[in-house]
Image: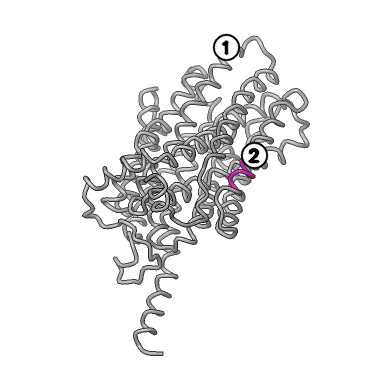
Amino acid sequence: MNSSVLNNSNDEQRTLKYRWVVWGVIVLSYAIKFFHSLSMGVIKDTLILEFGITETSFVSIGNVFFYIYLIMQIPTGLLVDTLGARIVAALGTLIAAIGITIFSFSHSLALLYIGRGLVGLGTSVVFVSILKIQATWFRESEFGTMTGITCFIGTLGGALAQTPLAMMVSSIGWRNAFRIIGVISIVISLAIYFIVRNRPEDLGMTSLNKQKVSNETHTGYTRIFKGLWEVLRNPQTWPIFLMYAGFYGTYVIMMGYYGTSFIASVYGKTTVQASNYIIAGVLGSAVGSIVVGSVSDRIKSRRKPLIITGGLYVITWAVMAFYNGGMPPEIMLIPLIFAIGFTSAAYVISWPTVKEVNNPMYVGVSTSVANIGGFFGTIVLPPIIANVFVKYGNTLPSVELYQKAFIIVLIATVIGFVSSLFTKETKCKNIYMEIKKEAA
């Protein structure tokens, strides 16, 4: 074995080790993002009481996060593909820290909106930055698995927004709890800036990914906008978009907005007790993310795990909405909510699939467009559900009220599942050129 082969082997080993440091630091910011997306349910009753707001106003405050997150997805793709994931993620995490600090000091609705909006703005850039890091630091064949692991870590952050947050709120108050999150976010922002690099070559290491991925900071904006147009006009992008909207939007309804109040109202539990049930769903999503992502890579298929898991997701919501008149026996609650979380992880397939049906030069842009789908669902569904509570809250018993809301959720899951049937099988490799040939 000659010296050049030995040197290449040593360089590859350095990359194999350091990539986990790079990914590990930036994924912490994604855990914080997930915490913010699911944290409002625990403080719902507190905010309504303290600020004297309605159910609809509460949802609108929570949804500022998702509105801005959605609006920022295409700009995020452009920023990540031009400035690089490191700078974008570090700055975004810092902005989120400022936002949650403002939120925690708010004594007016205006500041609540501003703080929540800045949190949405800052966290909106993190996930696409991670996907870009995965595309440059990991092999193409590992993308689905790494996306699943990323979602696993993220949903653990969401788990912190359940029982742990409820316990913190009861002991030190919601304001101090969120201030602690702000300090942690600042530390993570600094760590991203000083530790993360956009690609192995920036540290003189060997790239593991033979596929050409745009990751230079001098990439032209004209070329990136051309890539955006390619992604938007690709018909294979849109089934993924709609699937993610249906599955993730309904997941957030249960875990982020109404799950805790559903269990508290229908089953007579305290907020802390109810959050113990919801944490089962968040953990289910964490486990499901790893299982769905790794199985997809292992069997070299995107459609099969998507359709099977998505079908089970619809069935699980049907049980929640209709079994025993919309009030499943209490003994079934934890397994049922865990199953909702686990099977919702079908949406994990969206990012590797959208990457594989579009030009590999535009990983940031294509995954951003797919990401819009998920947050489109989180914007459209909560106001519809809130209107159910406003219209029928004073006339229907809690069980019937939540059943009516959950039937709407079930319809949204069906739309997501039907969309999944139209996704293209990629066999875990980029098929962009094949699609272009078929269209020619």
The answer to if 399 sits in the magenta stretch is no
Q: Nearer the viewer, residue 195 or 152?
A: 152
Q: How is the image coloured?
A: one colour
Relative to 5, residue 258 above or below: above
Q: Amino acid at mark 1?
A: Lys
Q: Nearer the viewer, residue 28 or 361?
A: 361
Residue 193 placement: quadrant: bottom left
Callout 2: few (<14), some (14-19), or many (20+) C-alpha neighbours within 10 Å? many
| Residue depth check, mark 1 versus mark 2: number of the one nearer the observer | 2
Q: Earlier in the sequence, mark 1 or mark 2?
A: 2
Q: Amino acid at mark 2?
A: Gly
Residues at marks 1 and 2, CA–CA distance in whole angstroms = 31 Å
What segment carries the magenta color?
A: 305-311
Relative to 206, residue 55 above or below: above
Q: Which residue is mark 2?
A: 311
The answer to if 308 sits in the magenta stretch is yes
Residue 184 appearing in the image? no
Residue 410 appearing in the image? yes
Q: Secondary structure at mark 1?
A: helix
Is residue 227 found left or right of 28 in the rendered image? left
Q: Residue at x 51, y 43 (%)?
A: 423
Q: Position of residue 427 (x, y in %)?
A: 52, 55
Q: Position of residue 200 (x, y in %)?
A: 34, 66
Is residue 124 found left or right of 144 in the rendered image? left
Callout 1: few (<14), some (14-19), or many (20+) C-alpha neighbours within 10 Å? few
Residue 195 placement: quadrant: bottom left
Q: Secondary structure at mark 2?
A: helix
Q: Which residue is mark 1?
A: 391
**Farthest residue, direction top:** 395
**Farthest residue, direction bottom:** 1
- Identify the image quadrant of the N terminus: bottom left
